[in-house]
Amino acid sequence: MSGRARLALCAYAATLLAAGSLIPLVEGIGWLVQAAMLLGVQSGVGALARRVPLARTLTIALQTLVTLVLLTLVFARDHALFGLLPGPGAVMRLGELLVAGGEDVGTYSTPAPLTDGIKLMVIGGVVLIGLVVDALAVTFRSAAPAGLPLLALYSVAAGLSDGGASWLWFLLAASGYLLLLLAEGRDRLSQWGRVFGGAARNAGGLSDGLAGVGGGTSPVRTGRRIGVLALGIALVAPLALPALDSGLLGGSGPGNGKGSGGGTISAVNPLVSLQNNLNQPDNREVMTYRSNIEDPQSLYLRILALDEFNGSEWRSSTRRLTDVPERLPQPTGLSGDVAVTEVRTNISASRSYQQTYLPLPYPASEVRVGGRWRYEPEGRTLVGDDGQTTRGAQYEVGSLVVEPTADQLAAAGTPPEELVREYTRVPGSLPGVVADTAEEVTEGAANAYEQAVKLQDWFASDGGFTYDTTVTSGTGSSAIARFLRDKEGFCVHFSFSMAAMARTLGIPARVAVGFTPGTMKANGATSVGLRDAHAWPELYFEGVGWTRFEPTPSRGSAPSYTRPEVPTDSASDVAEPSADTSDAPSAAPSADDSCPPQLRQEGGCGPSQDAGAALPTDRGTPAGTVLLVILAAVLAVVLPLSPLLWRTRTRNRRLGSEGRTPADAAARTLAAWREITDTAWDHGIGPDDSLTPRKAAARIVRLGRLDTGAAEAVHRIAGSVEQVLYAPEPRPAAGLAEDALAVRAGLRASAGRGARLRATLLPRSSVRVVWAVAERRTALAERWANRPGAGRWTARLRRLSRQHG
């Protein structure tokens, strides 16, 4: 195998070992197999291009083109020209997947599900890093700088894994890099001999060695500098990388308060993930619940409220956290004149659902949940503390069903001045069309309640809006103006626009994010899936408090107090919770139950109401994944130890030879001599085939600083070698194995700790394996070239080459 071929193989192995650090970030390791295959093709193309040979730039360009074709075949075949070539459609598709993958990264906590976007990001990233490493280490023959892209790959994994990138992955990545450096060093030694420095030569023409005098720079010093730089990047890069933010299915969130009564909740924006969840091909189940509520379609599960609009986005304000009280305080603004019913809900979150905010019916009055949770009073939300998430959480919630009448909402008093000032604030960048449209839509309304109902009905049925989850998401001022013009969007656009328009009318408003009620299952429980993710506006009315509205068509259900045709006179008594808090309604609601009446009359409910109940997602680890993990672990252990294993096996075979014939005696003696020569080589005394056995033995004794016993053993075996080589009748010698082992012990005793460790783990004589493979390949090539009829084919190929040259 040539030096460049060894370098290419080591570059391939180093990239794969560094890519192993990405395993904790995503579910399964099937992507790593695909990445290995694509990386192998990419490396093979580079090897062929260098063998031609092509110019360096052309080699890299060819590898890049082949990589793009491979990614097109895997991720955008349906959009490719002739199913192969990466045309404009395929490039756009890859771009869409990358955007979706970026949103998924901000959505899921580790290990994230292997969506198409995340899969393209991890496989494409590994292949791209592999291309850079191959170009630096093999094409430009500079392996040391190739450690920087490998370090970048590991640093990204370490920064995103939140502690999942353990020392094992760093050790594997570092081993791959060291393997690459070793391959480059051996390649240079095979061509030029050992390079100690770039020093100028003295007057005698001899190098000054390690002195480093002259214009060159010692590779040892360069290696130290690269090592220091790499270590610095490894320490600093993870600190600069963003952690996975908390989305609807986010990971670690911002609840960082510690101790009683302290801590804050910083602003987050979970809406990055909402559109992707709504467009998932599978409605993956994130939680199930049972409740004794009479109207299941009114049980929205609320995660948090976005109450700050800065012109570029809606976000949650920074709030103070407290300990979770035994019973949550009375909701802000709710008076005793409004009918209230308390219900109980038991919720079980899937183990695949990880995010920091605990989904709760609003307004919750009591929460019983295990783990480390904190309470944010303004939004009435529970936030995980010190890494606490919803993963596999089971909890019970008492909540209030607030049932105001239209007259109570219409007669609402003036809200507190401080609340109005905070929740009616709009940025100066908000286009005037928003306020103008709000005034136009609510013309003739007598009070804030009628204005809110007019806004809701305009968005949901009267304004000609279309529900479309493929519209580009946006939460800023320009996105709201664009939505009012194009009238196409999904819940984010509807809720943000209505909240912004309500604020321009002086109505306090914010946006809640969470899940719609979900779908009833056969066992009486209700399943909530990814496609139930939702956003809706909450408007404040004094005496009622924060009140839900539903402007999004074909999603959720319009509240009863916004439908004049529905009687709202209800008893004001508070119902006691039932004895069995896990009982669910006996009948499953039909698809039409969740559809607003005005849309049901127009046939606008659509098939989106028939979201089927998703099956449980946690089915255990597949057997194939277990086998692949075991295989990867075995390879991770065996590959670094393969030189040691080969050397041990070779030593045992040489010193364990049997037979009594003169030929056997000669073979035993020569095998023992070869073992001594290789042992000395492993300890830094390279073989010199130009010396006689006697002079070679003296050289080993001198350079190895052997004691008397080991020196006599070397000379005895050297004498036996001369006897079997030159004597007419070779005589069998006794104690060859014992002498060889004595020499090995003497060499180890005189060597330093580092030299002994290298001689054991990375013996220099293991290069004989590479030589043996190269000899066999040469023999096969000669046999193939000398086969009958080979001359005619060779001549024909040469003629074709000249014609196309």
Image: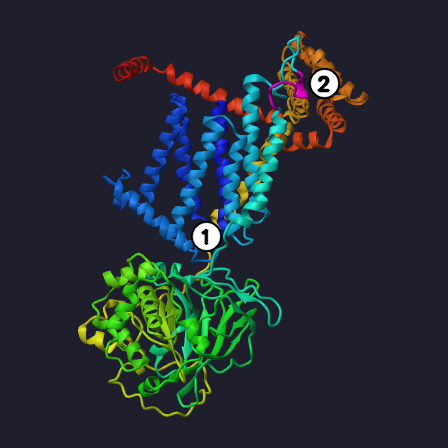
- Front position in the image: 494 or 94: 494
Residue at (57, 69) in percent of width and height: 372
Q: Is residue 425 left or right of residue 685?
A: left
- Front position in the image: 756 or 226: 226
Q: Secondary structure at mark 1?
A: loop
Point out residue 396 in the picture as x, y percentages from the top left corner.
48, 77
In the image, farthest residue toward the right: 708
| In the rendered image, the vertical position of residue 353 relative to residue 768, given as above or below | below
| Residue indicated by mark 1 | 26
| Residue indicated by mark 2 | 700
Q: CA distance from mark 2 to mark 1?
A: 54 Å
> Which-is-in-front pick, marks 2 and 1?
1
Residue at (62, 24) in percent of width and height: 218
Mark 2, Cα crowd under 10 Å, few <14 / some 14-19 / many 20+, is: many
Residue at (28, 80) in percent of width and height: 450
Identify the amino acid type marked 2.
Answer: Ile
Residue at (42, 75) in percent of width and height: 420
Identify the amino acid type marked 1.
Answer: Val
Region rendered in magenta: 208-217
The image quarter containing residue 310 is bottom left
